[in-house]
Image (cartoon, rainbow, N blue to C red):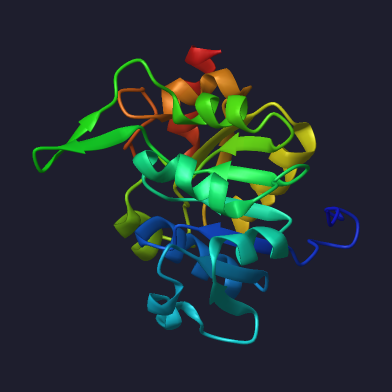
Amino acid sequence: MAAWSWRNGATKMKIGVIGAGGIGGTIGTLWAKAGHEVFFSSRNPEQLSNLITGENTQAGTVAEAAAFADVILLACYYTTINEAISAAGSLDGKILIDATNPYERENGKLHRVPDVSSGLELAAKLPNTKVVKAYNTLPTATFANEAHRSEPYTVFYCGDDAEAKAILAQLIIESGFIGMDTGNLTQAIHQEPGGVLYNRPMLANEAQQLVTSLI
């Protein structure tokens, strides 16, 4: 995996996006604009041509994106996670940013899956992958329309691997937001639906006060 160079600035990362819909397509495009190499993927890669905007963007299958990437953004539906990670193949040693939320559709309506953390489930399923949780607390429109504000909104993140979190923090900055570390991966429950950090656009001062109260 490419190392992050703090002395010489950010290394260009190879990022795979699995699930290139609203969140995946938007965040991946922001990273591409920041100069990273981004490989978009989904179950229907032929529908992703609109995301290929330059030499540093491409699209293909989930397996191709996973093989290409050092860092993976997982932004698929909760109900398709098993299908997505099976299609990806080995993710050992990679950083996986989990942007999923534990919802399922029933009778045409979305419902929160009770007593489930998709972040913790992923970590259990992928013990040799560096799972971090981020980009799941704000809607697509906020990411699309509010990036690079003079006072940036907060993107909360958590995880158990210090290097992975350092890289993620820089990627959050480069996507036009400011990161707020909430702790280890067990803190994912606060970022997921029903948690106090979910769906609350916040500036850094307010976010810091809230995170401090949780630790």
Residue 161 lies in what quarter of the image?
top right
Q: Quadrant of the C terminus?
A: top right
Rendered view: 105 above or below 213: below
Q: From the viewer's side, name the closer residue of 169 and 159.
A: 159
Q: At which x and y percent is residue 62?
A: 55, 61
| Residue at point 70%, 37% (across, down) | 129
Q: At which x and y percent is residue 48?
A: 42, 76
| Residue at point 65%, 58% (across, down) | 66
Rendered view: 171 above or below 205: below
| Residue at point 55%, 45% (across, down) | 85
Q: At which x and y percent is residue 23?
A: 40, 56
Is 83 displayed left or right of 64 in the figure? left
Regarding residue 178, the answer to whether it shows in the image is no
Q: At which x and y percent is residue 12?
A: 76, 67
Is 13 displayed left or right of 146 in the figure? right
| Residue at point 49%, 49% (across, down) | 84
Residue 203 lies in what quarter of the image?
top left
Is 67 displayed left or right of 147 in the figure? right
Q: From the viewer's side, name the closer residue of 196 and 64.
A: 64
Regarding residue 68, the answer to whether it shows in the image is yes
Q: Residue furthest bottom?
A: 54
